[in-house]
Image (tube, coloured by chain):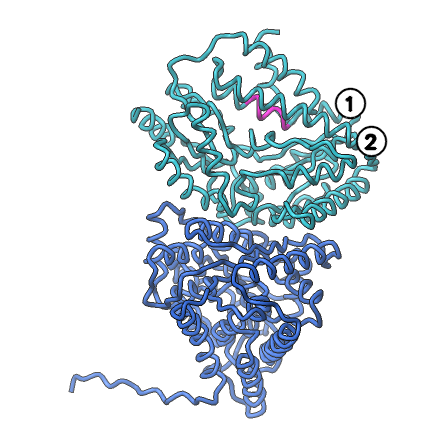
Amino acid sequence: MGEEVKKSRPAPDPNSAKFKLGQIAAKAYSDAMEAKARGEMVGWCASNFPVEIPETLGLYVCYPENQAAGIAARGGGERMCNISEGEGYSNDICAYARISLAYMKAKEAPEQNMPLPDFVLCCNNICNCMIKWYENIAKELDIPMIMIDIPFNPDYEVSDAEVEYIKAQFWDAIHQLEEYTGKKWSDERFKEVMEISGRSSRAWIEAASQAKYVPSPFNGFDLLNHMAVMVTARGKAEAAEAMETLLKEYKENHEKGVSTFRAEEKYRIMFEGIACWPWLRVTSTGLKSRGINMVTTIYADAFGYIYEDFDGMCRAYANVPNAMNLEHARDKRIKLCRDNSVEGVLVHTNRSCKLWSGFMPEMSRQIGEACGIPVASFDGDQADPRNFSEAQYDTRVQGLMEIMEANKGGN
Amino acid sequence: MAVNELLAQLHEVAASPKKQLDKYLKEGKKVVAVTPVYTPQEIIHSMGLVPMGVWGADMEINEAKKYYPAFICSIMQTVLELGIKGEYEGVSAIVIPSLCDSLKTLGQNWKYAVKDIPFIPMTYPQNRKPAYGIKFTKAGYERVIRDLEVATGAHFSEFALAESNKIYNEHNAVMREFAEIAAEAEITAVQRSDVFKSAWFMLPEEHTAIVRKLNEELKNGPKAEGKLKVLVTGILADSPNLLKTFDENGIKIVADDVAHESRQYRTDVPDMENPVDALAQKFADMDNCTLLYDRDKKRVDYIIEQAKKHDAKGVIVLMTKFCDPEEFDYVPIKRACDAAGLMHLNIEVDRQMVNYEQAHTMIQAFKEMF
């Protein structure tokens, strides 16, 4: 018989964190689509914009970075990049931006649709590229742009002058949105959202910290998938609940001695940079086949926000990884490496991200020296599949593994 | 002094910044390097220090590769390269703003790559116009003042800043006047570039004195005839090899929107009681630049307006490779040119360019379209 026998996958457990998180991520898009169909305004929102603001105001927002990652992971990155390059955008521009600008023109992508925006919420604590990207959308669609500027902080601590500047902008943004959308700010509702966001963040960070156990109760690539919920829904009660389920599962995994890393965990690494979404399977398999578990990444921590009040929120949004100076960014990573018994660092030199990659060689050298662990890097891109070479990745990972093995006292 | 002598003097300065650095150091002055695109030069000047621009150089990159991946713009890469190689030896500090993502990384790399020249950050707000933005700009200036005092031992006084603000405004006026006169006068693209480039390596009062004389001479001199008039936009337009092609093809720059050139001189420090407030207000008043938040893309309208005002027939975009802010603006510029009936050309430029053949061919073909 020549018929292929397909393995049937077991039905997902609706009480599992994976199922719940998948549902929330999908619902964020369907809710926005339905809202748009009802005639409600929908915004496009930068991933590190204070989500508490639209959530408190009861506004529907979608996240172009998340959409671009989704499109890229499902194979549509190159097609979309080609559309924006056809418009005249350079292929040196961030691939998330190129995909998003292409979506604005094409208005659909089978990999991940979302409604076109009535306003954009921009925050540059992740990069200044966001500003230009959202300027172009706002101008072309002739819609308002709410701009919260959280500058790159050259100092270790966030200054009072910066907090004051951010706070004034938060209120300005709230007032602009109230005026444009007719929604009203409520301190009571903000308090609820803050508490929920705090719950989600605490559970998320604690879940990620379960990698402190050897072996880790999870495969670090899980974090990259679940993170979508932290980006899009951290202020929603169902997200907090799902994150608490995730934490519970990871704790149970540890107690039972099982893991979602389906191989023997021989080596533990920190992955640096945004995931290489178009090559997620390749990058994941390249590690797993060698028994390398990516147990931690700063990228996951980036979306956990814990604070006590409005001022604390301003400070928290200034303390995100891409807004920190080298020393602060380095020390956070060193802590992750030490807390999680990391034996090596794999750096994604991401062609799309000048800020992330621009001082990474120096920072990763310092991390390697401080922790006494090897560092390897590979060239890739968060969403444009053309900027990655499987052969180079394989060689670099193999090299990293050999040094980690030698450090264990092996051959 | 004749036009050619004045231009030769400025060419000498533009071509040999190291000589200028040595001259100021020999005079017992302290020099502070300032990187693209905007820094509070008025403050540095008011403290008796010499601000000197560092915009990299056309050269091969070796040492900076230890710090930068290949896809960071070559201005940042070569500034770092020159720093590592000791070309800025004697400089007391470097002021680096964080107006683009690559500039943010330059400051961070500098601390480790060039340890003997202290890094002074200048954090400008993007929401620069509201009162809270102006206050934040002022906080940034106050920090620069404190850091300069530590790095150089110089002292700050509001009285001296008020004087420096005036000196810079005079320089702005004379540079704006030069740009207008150069649009008509018989002056090559290379010579025009020398006038702008030399400004980065001289005290503003010295540069003002020379350019003022030059303006007088050019006003009374012969006018350029029969040239194809263009507006040039971009971050940098200082490559003699590229600019020669403009001259060889009879292309005349009648206006520019170049960050290294006219963008520096558009906005004056307003007359206000407190000179630090006035300088912060100046930043709030600045517009039409790719690195300053611009929801309405006023820069694009400005380019079209300036092109029309100067009777330019085309717009030449000199696109600094890997400058993503400029790359984002290119599409609206291109569309606006099409709508306004202006021909446009996009030439990718790089500090590491050795072969200009492709650019030459593009410029030639552009000329032939008229």
Where residue A95 sits: x, y (%)? 43, 56
Chain name for mark 2: B
Q: For chain A, what colour was chosen?
A: blue
Q: Residue at x 60, y 29 (%)?
A: B265
> What is the number of the mark on residue B27?
1
Local SS, label 2: helix
Q: Which residues are magenta?
A: B194-200
Residue B180 colored in magenta in the image: no
- Chain letter, colour cyan in render: B
Asked if both marks, 2 and 1, belong to the same chain, the answer given is yes
Chain name for mark 1: B
Where residue A99 sits: x, y (%)? 39, 57
Q: Earlier in the sequence, mark 2 or mark 1?
A: 1
**Badge 2 is on which residue?**
B159
Q: Residue at x 81, y 42 (%)?
A: B150
Which residue type carries mark 2? Phe
